[in-house]
Image (cartoon, rainbow, N blue to C red):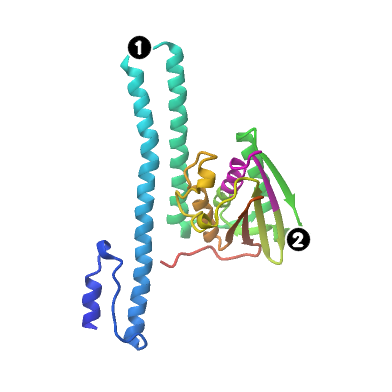
């Protein structure tokens, strides 16, 4: 036991990959060591995720800020005609909007992650929330086409309801449908809603470029962008991380399947009452 204590005391963030050694893995002390090592695995993964997150946030914030400063410097070098100033202001406005969007999505991700156990739950009709999502997105984007289909629509209204946080579920649907439209060549998302056997299933399909299998493993990680989609549309790679976080809070499931014909995201939630998510860490 003294040897194990000494080993644990030598493990710091700088060498968190180190693991506790014990010759007999089958006795009580061996099981305790295995538990320590599993905890260290989780800590190491958390630290790596944190480092990646900070590095990516810094990169995403630095680029538009550098661009804004450069444009201001060029504009101030000498006096210019009003047309030049107008074009500069339009470019600055676009960069400011990008920063605002990134800041808002980061705040959404932080709120759903940090305050998961404090989110108020209520009865939410998911079919109505889908209609609201469609209306809002098409009001913001004139070129978006959102096709809603209600398959196996139940007679019982309770089957349309899930227990959840309405604001978070709205953000989830907005991100899923917006992504589908954004990466579709025709700006079209095909959304199917169905409720059966105590489950609400929402699929969101678009005919965008196929996402490679190797990228699907990382698609819900913050700031990850597949090469297949990064070249076709602007973005920060935060939206799907928010989708995954909100889905976890609601004890649901989110899956993705991508082929040459297009990409489908499948969201599954319980239609019967569930207890609000409580973190155990």
Examine the rendered structure and indicate whether residue 198 appears above or below residue 101.
Answer: below
Which residue is at the front of the view, 99 or 180?
180
Rendered location of residue 226, percent (x, y): 50, 49
Q: Earlier along the polypeptide chain: callout 2 or callout 1?
A: 1
Rendered location of residue 162, percent (x, y): 63, 59
Is 181 in the magenta? yes
Can you tell which mark lies on residue 79?
A: 1
Is 253 in the magenta? no
Mark 2, mark 1: which one is toward the viewer?
A: 1
For residue 140, what is the image quadrant? top right
Report the residue at 35% width, 85% height from top. Answer: 25
For residue 38, what is the image quadrant? bottom left
Residue lying furthest right: 155
Rendered location of residue 44, percent (x, y): 34, 64
Image position of 192 (left or right of 267) = right
Residue lying furthest bottom: 27
Which residue is at the front of the view, 210 or 160?
210
User: On the image, numbered disc 2 is attached to which residue?
Assistant: 156
Report the residue at 35% width, 32% height from top. Answer: 66
Report the residue at 25% width, 68% height from top. Answer: 11
Examine the rendered structure and indicate whether residue 80 appears above or below residue 242.
Answer: above
Examine the rendered structure and indicate whether residue 96 appears above or below residue 188.
Answer: above
Which SS class for mark 2?
loop
For residue 199, what is the image quadrant? bottom right
Give the magenta-colored segment's residue range.
173-192
Image position of 219 (left or right of 123) = left
């Amino acid at each position: 036991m003294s040897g194990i204590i000494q080993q644990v005391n030598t493990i710091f963030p700088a060498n968190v990959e180190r693991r506790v050694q014990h010759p007999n893995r089958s006795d009580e002390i061996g099981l305790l060591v295995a538990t320590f090592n599993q905890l260290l695995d989780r800590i190491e993964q958390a630290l790596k995720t944190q480092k990646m997150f900070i590095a990516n946030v810094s990169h995403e914030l630095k680029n538009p800020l550098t661009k804004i400063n450069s444009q201001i410097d060029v504009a101030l070098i000498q006096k210019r005609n009003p047309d030049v100033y107008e074009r500069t202001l339009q470019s600055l406005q676009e960069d400011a909007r990008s920063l605002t969007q990134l800041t808002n999505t980061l705040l959404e991700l932080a709120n759903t992650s940090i305050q998961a156990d404090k989110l108020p739950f209520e009865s939410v009709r998911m079919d109505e929330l889908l209609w609201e999502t469609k209306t809002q997105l098409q009001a913001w984007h004139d070129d978006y086409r959102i096709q809603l289909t209600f398959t196996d629509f139940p007679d019982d209204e309770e089957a349309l309801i899930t227990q959840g946080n309405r604001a978070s579920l709205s953000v989830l649907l907005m991100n899923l449908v917006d992504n589908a439209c954004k990466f579709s060549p025709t700006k079209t998302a095909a959304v199917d809603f169905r409720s059966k056997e105590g489950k609400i299933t929402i699929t969101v399909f678009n005919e965008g470029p196929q996402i490679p299998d190797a990228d699907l493993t990382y698609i819900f990680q913050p700031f990850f962008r597949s090469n297949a989609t990064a070249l076709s549309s602007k973005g920060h790679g935060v939206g799907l991380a928010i989708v995954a976080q909100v889905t976890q809070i609601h004890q649901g499931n989110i899956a993705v399947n991508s082929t040459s014909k297009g990409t489908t995201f499948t969201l599954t939630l319980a239609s019967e009452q569930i207890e609000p998510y409580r973190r155990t860490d």
